[in-house]
Image (tube, helix red, strand yellow):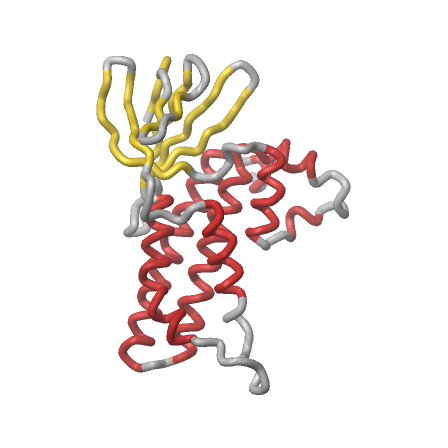
Amino acid sequence: MAVGELDPRKIYAGQIRQASARLAAALRFHSVYVADKDVPSLDAAVLQIRKALELIAFAAIAPDKEAFLKVRASDEAGKFTRDFHARKFLLTLDKVNPDFYPLALTGPTRKEQGMEFGRKETGYLTRDRFEKVYDRLGKHLHAQNPWGSDPNIQNLAKDIPSLVEEIYQLIELHARIVRRPGKIEIWVWQTDRQGGMPAFLEAIADGDLIDTKRKSRAGVSGAKQ
């Protein structure tokens, strides 16, 4: 079966699973750099983090692929299948679905009306930070121009563990809100840092989502795991 024909949830899960594995690889490469100051190992860590972000962007497309393609309809035929730039994906998805970005969660707690999840306020990679981190990493994917300015790789090396943790905090437990005609699907994913397939819970909201300062929840008419 071609990738385009797969269940969007399977594509989403596969991309998030690969992203988690890339983050784990980045930490392994980073540990080699810390021990030996081996710059190619630091380069490898940077590449793995950037690829993890691209995988998260690919995952974000899956539930809204048809609408995404309509926005991209004026592009050269087939160009979508050759795309890789995560920041450009995000800019297009902004036009397709304002709820496309993973919603970092805490919890859950069981309530009479269903499961309630808290919304993380800090510690995870926000939508704005995603673009900044992606661009920052991109500057370190090429050989240094000997006549250019100092790329400050030491500062980047120092930040890598916290960058990886921010991304894990985004995807480790998160919701993807999928708006369909007449209903709202809420895909809740729990990501395995050890590389296993993410656990999945699907809920259907009775009405629109309730979003307060500290909580994001929905009345649940049905759920499956």
| Residue found 29% across the figure and 50% down from its top | 193
The image shows residue 10, relative to residue 218, as above or below, that is below
Image location (x, y in percent) of residue 141: 52, 70
Q: Can residue 7 be seen here?
A: no
Q: Nearer the viewer, residue 153 or 2?
A: 153
The image shows residue 43, relative to residue 92, as above or below, that is below
| Quadrant in the picture for residue 202 | top left
Q: Can residue 186 be seen here?
A: yes
Q: Is residue 59 left or right of residue 190?
A: right
| Residue found 35% across the figure and 52% down from its top | 166
Q: Nearer the viewer, residue 5 or 27?
A: 27
| Residue found 37% across the figure and 44% down from its top | 171
Please identify the quadrant where the N terminus is shown.
top right
The image shows residue 46, relative to residue 108, as above or below, that is below
Q: Nearer the viewer, residue 172 or 78?
A: 172
| Residue found 53% across the figure and 65% down from its top | 138
Q: How many marks?
A: 0
The image shows residue 150, relative to residue 53, as above or below, that is below
Please identify the quadrant where the C terminus is shown.
top left
